[in-house]
Image: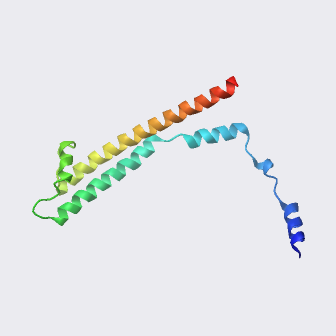
Amino acid sequence: MTTQDKADSLDRHQINMTEFSPSNSEEQLLKKAVLRLNGQVLGFVLGITGAVIIFLATNWLVFKGGDVVGPHLSLLGQFFIGYSVTFVGSFIGAVYGFITGYLSGLLIGWVYNAVIFLKHRKNTDKKIFL
C-alpha cells in the first residue's frame, strides 16, 4: 500500500467534526459551569491543608525537642488564642488552621466568581450593543 492509498483511506474514514460540535447554548452552559469556582469546596480543601500543616509542624517541633521549642511557631498564639507549641496545642492550632483555611477559600471563591461574573457581564453587554 502506497502513501497515497493510505491518505485516501484516511480521507474516507475521517469524521466530520461539525456533527459533534455542541450548540451555542450548550457551550455557554459549559463555560458557566467551568468558570464558577465552588468556594465551599475550596474552603474545605484549604482548611484541611492548613489544619494538617499546623498539626504536623507543631508536633515535629514537639518531638524534636530542645531547650527552646519553636519560638517562631509559638507566635501563632498571638492570633490563635489557646495555641502553644505542645501536643494539645497542635489540636487547637489544627482547628484554627481549618477555620482560617475555610474562610480563606470562601473569600477566594467569592472574589473569583465576582470577577468572572463582572467580566462575563461586560462581554455580553458588548455583544448586545454591537
Residue plotted at (83% across, 59% down): 14
From the top left corner, tell me how far across and down residue 7 is, in percent: 86, 66
Left or right: where 129 falls relative to 57: right
The image quarter in which residue 59 lies? bottom left
Residue plotted at (35% across, 47% down): 47
Q: Residue furthest bottom?
A: 1
Up-down: is 7 above or below 31?
below
Q: Residue furthest top?
A: 129
Up-down: is 13 above or below 5?
above
Left or right: where 57 falls relative to 35: left
**Quadrant of the rendering where the C terminus is positioned:** top right
Q: Residue furthest left?
A: 67
Up-down: is 67 above or below 84?
below
Q: State the colouring used for the structure image.
A: rainbow
From the top left corner, tell me how far across and down residue 18 is, in percent: 80, 48
From the top left corner, tell me how far across and down residue 114 is, in percent: 49, 33
Residue plotted at (18% across, 43% down): 78
